[in-house]
Image (cartoon, helix red, strand yellow):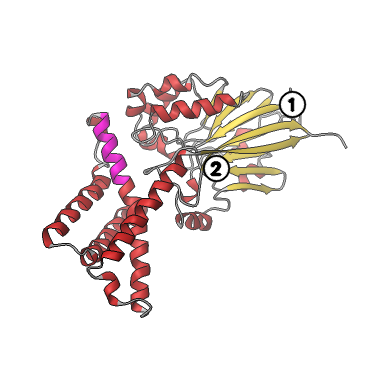
Amino acid sequence: MRYWTLIFFLLPLAGIAYATCRIWRLMPFGMWCKVGVMIVLTLCLACFFIQFSSLDRLPLPVARAIYETGNSSLFILLYVVMALLVMDALRIAHVAPKTLMVSNWATTLALAGGMALLFTGAYFHYLHKARQPLQIETAKELERPLKIVMLADLHLGYHNGKEELQRWVGLINAEHPDLVLIGGDIIDRSAGPLFAQHMQDEFRRISAPVYACFGNHEYYSGHDAAIDFYKAAGINVLNDTAVTACGINIVGRDDFASRHRRRLADLTAHLDKRRFTIVIDHEPHHLEEAERAGADFQFSGHTHYGQVWPISWIENAIYEDAYGPLQKGQTQYYVTSGMGIWGAKFRIGTRSEYVVLDLIPKKES
């Protein structure tokens, strides 16, 4: 974990050093204009590192501005570095002239305009929440056909605020669900802004019982604070717990990072296997455990499918199923790209979504 943390901070620093050098040479401005531009860019990127101090001590609007500016700058930096690397490769391969990267108005305007268009589109694409329908026919006992809304990775806090949660609750209630299942990471990094905006009241507007497991961000925000918010919001916490609701078994696993996480087989051992069994597990690790435990369906999140391309390719390399449906034996899986998002409100090559599962009796042949 320490190595990943080190890489998480070193990569942006390397990107900043490379981009700063190239942008300085690229801009066709006078010295003081260049200095002014670099100061603005430095302050924006500095917000990314500042946010890791305690934002809870700052007024909410200030904390939100620091969080959104810092994280948005990080994602934009990624694409600026990618564009600059392509231009450097073209120059080294003698496909483009050296003047492409030195005091060039056309390149400067193309780079700035291209980034503005790309990330404006990425922002509005993030705001659109895709409805992902699923239908499962089961031969197991059902009291009645069920409609279950499932979502994960809300990441509520400094950037996803109460106004957005109100809209999401409206989408959920419009489905008239029997159950709502949330696969972790309701809280982004601190429960403070959720309580400050009274987001618990919005969850209580959901017109169906809500069950949720913890994600890794619930531990970042503090276990006890997360439990307090879940209780205030009327969310039934399932951390290594199984219940029967609406005639089906629901098993919620503690997050993969928890030291006290129990074996799934132990959680399902006492369940009536004649009933349909759903597992909600935030991180899609060791998917074979659900198959071995006799679960019928597992819902996971965590990956966000990388949020932006090409990080989605990295997620595909890490996980057996980084996004979408999968079947192993008699067990079906769905890994969602998430309703909300971490960091910046951009989606490039991925989408924000909620899943609507229709669970129906299997027709006799």
As drawn, the residue found furthest toward the right would be 365
Assess disc 1: are there few (<14), some (14-19) or many (≥20) residues with their C-alpha within 10 Å of its C-alpha: some
Is 328 magenta? The answer is: no
Q: Residue at x 52, y 44 (%)?
A: 337
* Residue 267 screen position, x and y as percent: 60, 33
Q: Which residue is mark 2?
A: 336
As drawn, the residue found furthest toward the left would be 32
Q: CA distance from mark 1 to mark 2?
A: 25 Å
The amino acid at mark 1 is Leu
Secondary element under disc 1, as helix, strand or loop, is: loop
* 309 sits left or right of 75 in the view: right
Q: Residue at x 39, y 31 (%)?
A: 223
Q: Which residue is mark 1?
A: 142
Q: Start and end of the magenta stretch?
A: 60-71
- Label 1 vs label 2, nearer the camera: 2
* 328 sits left or right of 28 in the view: right
Q: Main secondary structure of the magenta part?
A: helix
Residue 1 visible in this rendered orientation of the protein: no
* Residue 231 screen position, x and y as percent: 45, 21
